[in-house]
Amino acid sequence: MTKNSMQICLDNQTLTAFSDGSFTITIDDTEWQFEGGSILTDDTTLSFGEMAQPKIERMETGIATGIRIRYTNCEPLSFELRLLLQKEGQLLAEWIPLSKQTKNIRQVCWPGSAIFDQTDSRWYSLLTLQQGLMIPNGWPVSFEKLPFNGQLESAAAYMPWFGQVKENDGYIAICQTPADAGYSCLHPAGGGTRLAFYWLPVLGKMTGVRKVRYSFRQDCDYTQLAKIYRQYAREIGLLRTLSEKAAANPKVDSLIGAGFVHTGIKTHVDPKSDFFDPAAPEKNNHLTPFSVRAKEIARYHQLGVDRLYLHLDGWGQPGYDNCHPDYLPACQEAGGWDGLRGLQQTVHNCGYLYGLHDQYRDFYHSAPSYDPALSVQAPDGSIFSMALWAGGPQDYLCASQAPHFVRRNFDKLFAEDIRPDCSYLDVFTCNEPDECANPAHPMTRSECLDYRLSCFAWLNANGILPSSEEAADWSIPQLVFCHYAPYSFMMERPGSPRKGIPVPLYNLVYHDCLIIPWPMENHPDGEDYMLYALLNGGAAYIRRDPAYPGMDGAFSITAGDQTEEDVRRWRIVSELQRKVAKMEMVSHRLLDKQGNQQQTVFSDGKRRITVQINLPEKSWNIQEELL
């Protein structure tokens, strides 16, 4: 089918749109070409170009000039595309459904990916996959699979944007309707990279306007693109700094510079769990009394650790990842409520903080409160279940119910004089948002994020610092810290080829808004992870005992002969973090093509602190200057 087109010019910008949804934008002498769109149904994939010839027309609004493409009387749905030039270097792309009935549609993919195939390492793509990833064109390792199928607002994309730079010209594509969206990344070994957004149905129907804002820049790099998003985050109310959070709760300042100790009390693996090992019963059950953990905390105080945060797993009677949301009482074999109160007293006598692991998404069939009527229900009425984690069979609890259980459980803790300084609500900021079609508590993905955020807000309102697993940025207004916000390679097995060069895109936007602890291992691949903690101005783990070895990052730090060395290394990181935690990370640079030497700069307008690391030499240099 022959493609029809329309072209408009505005100042130094020329926009050409085609009937298949593809478009080209030229700014001065730089041209960007974007492919057309497609619709994925239960049965087939249909490109926009295969649909009935659309109507293309110029449009004017009070704030923009652009092009409208209307696909009417089309199967499986009618829709409209809008491409609006808002101001110099800025383009708004909108997909608008026109049909009332849009069932059996799995995805709408538009705008398409930029044509970005030249094999030149000065051309690179930016993914907000966890802390951030740069994929230079020509990178020898392929990449095509994202966690959570690329859904935004999850570990697949802490921030809802991606970008590309060719030599010195680049763009950032910000998804402005991220709750029901995802992205794809296709990078063949040695080739270029294709990045594109896709749109998901809402409770089975393609409803609502979907928006992407492109900002095109000349003479830019990834730092400048990240700063565009930082300003956008500020404008929409996401950017809330640690200084603001500390003004509301001074415990934030006590957490800055603290050594993170992650450990647990009770492990119990249900025989119905995928983790259960009948051949090795010692792996299925383990218990450490509260009194033992109290002695370990006192030992850190004796070693001169002045600030410490204890993250405690498995403190409830059922054991780690069992029976949620019915976790109480405190583990009786480990000392019960008296034992937990004793550990709390030891922590506070040392001047430390502690928080308890908790969970309000995994809904275990073994929980006394379990009722499938409260579970997440798909539009077809089905309920997803699995048995991956230690507690065995589970559904997902509808997030609309989570705030009720949070209040119930903490009221019971307070009644026992258990008042944690912090709380860890697991998976909320790592896993994708859910939707629920149960007519008694229907919930969109956007509402799911609101419910999760309200749980963090309740904790803040009660003087408890909230944390969660990772760092999706919808949580920034309420979240104070997280379990980690790692580079993606830190979660892979030793020896796995890296899919690109890690760059701290997240910290370039949010460093002064969130406390992020970093692993401190000397990794078998040869790198000292402490250097990444320094480079990012973050917190340091003194001890890290993952509940599921090999899944929570590949390695752990355990108490024992290396304790004094662990404390020595923590001091190095802590000293820097206390200086830079409330500073913006104003820049990051790769000092060589491989990323073996890197530099970050932090500033609050009064001081500037520059951190440079050399990974092969396992060395670092920190310089401080007044402005």
Image (spheres, rainbow, N blue to C red):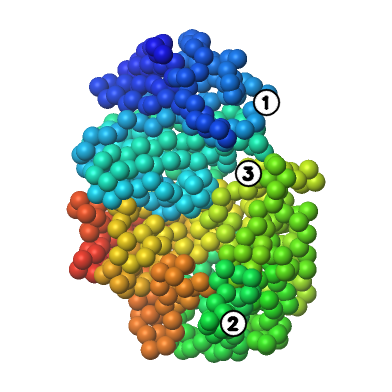
Q: Is residue 351 left or right of residue 509?
A: right
Which amino acid, by three-letter code, is at mark 2? Asn
**Which tag is nearer the camera, tag 3 or tag 2?**
2
Q: Quick one: label 2, few (<14), some, or many (20+) residues within 10 Å?
A: some
Would you name the residue on which mark 3 appears?
Answer: 445
Neighbours of disc 3 within 10 Å: few (<14), some (14-19), many (20+): many
Left or right of residue 327, residue 539 in this image: left
Which image quadrant for residue 230?
top left
Q: At label 1, which amino acid type do we have? A: Gln
Residue 501 on image: x %, y %: 29, 52
Q: Are marks 3 and 1 in contact (CB under 8 Å)?
A: no
334 left or right of 374?
Answer: left
Q: CA distance from mark 3 to mark 1?
A: 20 Å
Label 1 element class: loop
Where does label 2 land, which residue? 285
Label 1 sits on residue:
101
Question: Relative to the observer, which residue lies in front, 386 or 54?
Answer: 386
